[in-house]
Image (tube, helix red, strand yellow):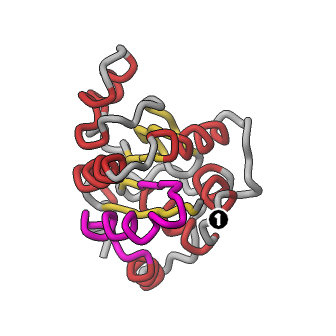
Amino acid sequence: MQTITALFDDYDNAADAVGELESMGVPATDLSIIASNADGRHSAAAEDAASGAGIGAVMGGAGGLATGLGAVAIPGVGPVVAAGWLAATAAGAAAGAVVGGATGGIIGALTDDGVSERDAHVYAEGVRRGGTLVTARVADDLVEQAQSILHASGSVDVGERRNQYEADGWSGFDPAAGDYRTDRGFARRDR
């Protein structure tokens, strides 16, 4: 079993990728999606989830992701809507239940599951800046197919994104930095 992760600038592309991963046989319990909600764009989805609406109605392409969608705040990332195992772990850090070192939250959850710390910083920063993170635990024989799905769905190149952030003076995710406000721009607009 391996963990694969991708960052998307477009939420709909991320939701489509989750749907395709489910179609290829990745169980909903092994999938997670975390989308920035700093600008409130997902507030209706979070309200629908809280009122008991089916996850399919809330997340479109991620219809079978049955572990629940909810609005939470993750330290340093800010408000998000999230579902799945990674979301539960990161939200637990927000409540003080799980802290993976100084960074905790998304970075601790990702590194605990085998993602490099260097990449985990970029993923956390990407969500903080308005992106959507998709993470899947897949059987070894499905890794290549799952990675192809994420790439074809429009995920960003994590190395290129790191270089873009670093060119602007970024040196790593800072959980004490606070919310990334919409007036500062999101991932696609901050270059």
Image quarter of the N terminus: bottom right
Residue 3 vs 86, above or below: the answer is below
Read off the residue under disc 1.
114
Q: How many marks?
A: 1
What x and y, as percent, mark residue 127? 43, 56
Q: Is residue 70 visible?
A: no
Amino acid bearing label 1:
Gly
Q: Residue furthest front?
A: 141
Return the residue nearer the eye: 72 or 112.
Answer: 112
Classify 59 as above or below 152.
above
Residue range corresponding to the magenta coloring: 134-158
Residue appearing at x 42%, y 54% in the figure: 134
Kindly tell me whether residue 37 is visible in this rendering.
yes
**Residue at screen point 29% across, 61% down:** 9
In the figure, residue 88 lies in which quadrant?
top right
Q: Residue at 45% x, 63% y: name it.
A: 142
Q: Residues within 10 Å of mark 1 (few under 14, many from 20)?
A: few
Q: Residue 39 sits in which quadrant? A: top left
